[in-house]
Image (tube, helix red, strand yellow):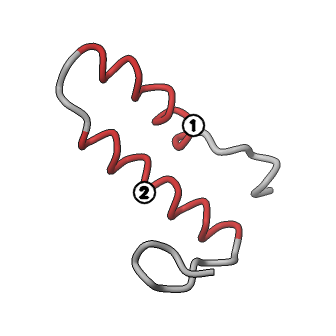
Amino acid sequence: MKDESGTEPPFDLRERTKVFGLQIVRMFVALPKTEEARVLGQPALQIVRQPDVRLFP
């Protein structure tokens, strides 16, 4: 199944996690610079910073 860019998505779990993390960081950077946006975006950014260690021993 192809993604929005027309390329095949990565199948490796590490690669998918990296792509997901980069998408979240880009979303956070694109949010308006308001307190509300920061409060909503901060939990998503924390998920990216602390992936489940059980996935990557």
Q: Residues within 10 Å of mark 1 (few under 14, many from 20)?
A: few
- Report helix, strand or loop for mark 1: helix
What residue type is disc 1 on? Ile
Q: Which residue is mark 1?
A: 47
Q: Tell me the quadrant of the picture where the N terminus can be found.
A: bottom right
Q: In the image, what residue occupies the spot 49% across and 53% down?
A: 21
What residue type is disc 2 on? Leu
Q: Which numbered circle lies on residue 14?
A: none
Q: Which residue is mark 2?
A: 22
Q: Return the residue found at the far left.
A: 33
Q: Tell me the quadrant of the picture where the C terminus can be found.
A: bottom right
- Report helix, strand or loop for mark 2: helix
User: With respect to residue 43, does 57 lie above or below?
Assistant: below
Q: In the image, what residue occupies the spot 30% across and 15% down?
A: 36
User: Is 48 situated left or right of 54 in this image?
Assistant: left
x%, y% of residue 48? Answer: 53, 43
